[in-house]
Image (spheres, rainbow, N blue to C red):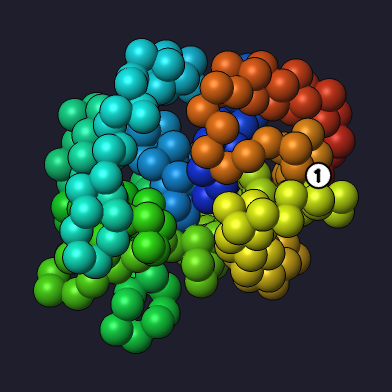
């Protein structure tokens, strides 16, 4: 059986992908193909390159992430996504074809307003494009076209897996907190973006044979980097509890 695993975006919440993948791998549940959007695309690319979940976690912990994303003040956005992700780019191969596990990365083409699925050729540009949160980062150019965050249109890119895999497992790291109360401008902006991308995830949940969404992530802020280790530990413990049901659903 070939299992496809789709990883959603979600900022620092995407650390949960690493804890969940670690737990799945310990039970012999291995991805035959990955897809990802936004920060999920970055996690998927590193995993597909052969990095262990704990290796990726350590890479993040060793990085001065805040200094890495100092404003570039481009006229198209505040930050340069390539500078922000420079800590991980050396750990990725140059092309999709060099990955150890097949990968599809989703990004939003600015001109057409539609999702582009990258699976061949240059890898790093595709990952940068998928992670390019609009307004925060300026668009990334790939083959003459401008791209922004894949999660805007497709935050759980399961469609390519339906074409190539026997079973599809989707991991969504952006559950909505029903007790939202932070009505200041920053909180409202984050809330608006979260609700927008959750709408397109709802359309794709039914395409998954297994859909995972850790509830504890509701209380985690998208850019709360201080909780990196906590998210990893909690997500690992969470998936261990879910394994009996997951194994039944994958049979």
Q: Is residue 134 visible?
A: yes
**Residue drawn at the location 68% of the way across and 70% of the way down:** 199
Compared across the picture, whether 135 is left or right of 33 comes to left
The residue indicated by pointer 1 is 249
- In the rendered image, which quarter contains the N terminus? top right
Q: Quadrant of residue 233?
A: top right
Relative to 219, say whether 20 is above or below: above
Q: Give the total number of marks visible in the rendering.
A: 1
- In the rendered image, which quarter contains the C terminus? top right
Q: Position of residue 169 (x, y in %)?
A: 65, 48
**Residue drawn at the location 22% of the way across and 54% of the way down:** 73
Q: Residue furthest front?
A: 184
SS for dot 1: helix
Q: Is residue 29 visible?
A: no
Crowdedness near tag 1: few (<14), some (14–19) or many (≥20) residues, C-alpha within 10 Å: few
Q: Nearer the viewer, residue 111 or 45?
A: 111
Q: Nearer the viewer, residue 218 or 245?
A: 218
Relative to 200, say whether 2 is above or below: above
Q: Quadrant of residue 184?
A: bottom right
Q: Position of residue 156 (x, y in %)?
A: 57, 58
Q: Position of residue 177 (x, y in %)?
A: 80, 49
**Residue drawn at the location 29% of the way across and 28% of the way down:** 67
**Residue drawn at the location 36% of the way across and 27% of the way down:** 65
Relative to 156, say whether 20 is above or below: above
Relative to 140, say whether 244 is above or below: above
Compared across the picture, whether 110 is left or right of 165 comes to left
Q: Position of residue 211 (x, y in %)?
A: 73, 50
């Amino acid at each position: 059986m070939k299992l496809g695993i789709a990883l959603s975006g979600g900022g620092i919440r995407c650390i949960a992908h690493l804890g969940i993948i670690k737990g799945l791998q310990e039970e012999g549940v291995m991805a035959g193909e990955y897809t990802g959007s936004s920060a999920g695309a970055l996690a998927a690319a590193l995993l597909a390159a052969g990095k262990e979940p704990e290796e990726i976690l350590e890479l993040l912990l060793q990085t001065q992430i805040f200094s890495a994303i100092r404003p570039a003040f481009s006229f198209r956005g505040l930050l340069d996504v390539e500078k922000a992700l420079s800590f991980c780019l050396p750990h990725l191969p140059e092309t999709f074809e060099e990955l150890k596990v097949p990968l599809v990365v989703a990004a939003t083409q600015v001109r057409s307003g539609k999702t582009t699925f990258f699976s061949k050729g240059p890898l790093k540009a595709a990952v940068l494009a998928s992670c390019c949160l609009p307004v925060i980062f300026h668009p990334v150019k790939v083959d003459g076209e401008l791209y922004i965050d894949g999660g805007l249109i497709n935050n759980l890119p399961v469609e390519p897996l339906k074409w190539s895999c026997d079973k599809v497992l989707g991991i969504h790291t952006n559950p909505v907190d029903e007790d939202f109360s932070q009505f200041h401008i920053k909180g409202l902006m984050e809330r608006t973006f979260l609700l927008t991308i959750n709408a397109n995830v709802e359309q794709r949940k039914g395409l998954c044979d297994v859909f995972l969404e850790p509830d504890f992530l509701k209380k985690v802020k998208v850019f709360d980097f201080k909780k990196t280790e906590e998210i990893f530990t909690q997500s690992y413990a969470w998936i261990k509890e879910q394994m009996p049901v997951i194994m039944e659903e994958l049979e």
